[in-house]
Amino acid sequence: MAATYKNHIELTIFGESHGKAIGIVIGNLPSGITIDQEAVKQDMQRRAPGQNALSTARKEADQVEILSGILDGKTTGAPLTGIIYNSDQHSKDYSLLKTYMRPGHSDYPAFVKYHGFNDVRGGGHFSGRITAPIVFAGNIAKQILKQHGIRIGGHILSVGTVEDKRFDISCDDQLLDTLLSKPYPTINDDVFAKMEQVILNAKASRDSVGGKVECVALHVPAGLGEPFFDSLESHISSLMFSIPAVKSVSFGDGDSIDQMTGSEANDEYYYDENGEVKTTTNHNGGITGGISNGMPITVTVTFKPTPSIAQKQKTINIETKENVELEIKGRHDPCIVQRAVVVVEAMLALAILDMMR
């Protein structure tokens, strides 16, 4: 099974969570771009499973083998193909799930759509594991954007009810460098200990918890995007909603801007000392009229709690057509938010690079 995104840049992801390998084909990249393989490895490790008690116990190196599209460290202009081999599958944990539909998962709609032939092991092609090749593609996009002066970064905005500070008008490259140096990126250094406790409490209760990731793109020039159907917001949102478990996407203060008055929500313009147009606030997240206005582009992505939990749940047996109970076995993240920051960054980078072509 494969899924394709086709605009200026073409992305085709392939593979299943418990298949031999997963990967991505990236089409229409510019040629002659030098790719830093160490930067790729760094982002891949940020998403990789099995690193601590806050994530799944599954161990995967997530090393990307490049099959085409790069020669002597530079892009050739041909489709760039990266493949990641799976090495730590416990497929027996999923034998029951051909007939028992997991609540909150893709199982039932996928059963209907694919007539029961879909791979349910680890979620198959619907699994968050498929975000690994997206992180690879996103890092390539980040490196290309950086050559245009554009920086992408993110942080854990919330876990459960515990919240970090938001990016504000003063967000700069130094802050992004600081966040990148942290194993769990939060702006407030003290807040992650509270988030960690929320995650561990959910794990101890055989439950899970959700949260939010906030991501920013710095130095995006004004004028990027189109009105209406191909607005910068709709373009970014379409890719963000392609990330498994994402349930909402907003920009700037989009979660609360409805509670403001117009005089509060409007970002007033001024010329700075260099004659550049700036705004005094950034409630609209750097996008107005569907087009970038030169301020930092900020997007907030909400993730639901991981649906695979060990508590007993009510569901159906699709074969016998009976109501049944299910206790999900296997290795699952009690919270995916801390591993999702780099995935959100990847999607933002891909969306902006796509609009620049």
Image (cartoon, grey):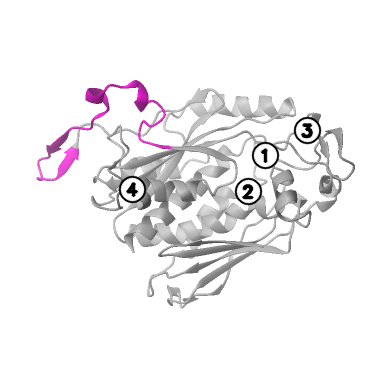
* Mark 4 crowd level (few <14, some 14–19, many ≥20, 10 Å Cα): few
State the SS at label 3.
loop
Quadrant where the image shows the C terminus: bottom left
- Residue 41 within the segment the image draws in magenta: no
Q: Is residue 71 depicted above or below 142 in this figure?
A: below
1 or 3: tag closer to the N-terminus: 3
State the SS at label 4.
helix
Which region of the structure is painted magenta? 250-278
CA gap between label 4 and label 3 equals 44 Å
Residue drawn at the location 74% of the way across and 34% of the way down: 309
The answer to whether residue 41 shows anywhere in this view is no
- The residue pinned by badge 2 equals 128
**Foreground: disc 4 or disc 3:** 4
- The residue pinned by badge 1 equals 333
Q: Amino acid at mark 3?
A: Ala
Q: Where residue 310 sits: x, y (%)?
A: 78, 33
* Mark 1 crowd level (few <14, some 14–19, many ≥20, 10 Å Cα): many
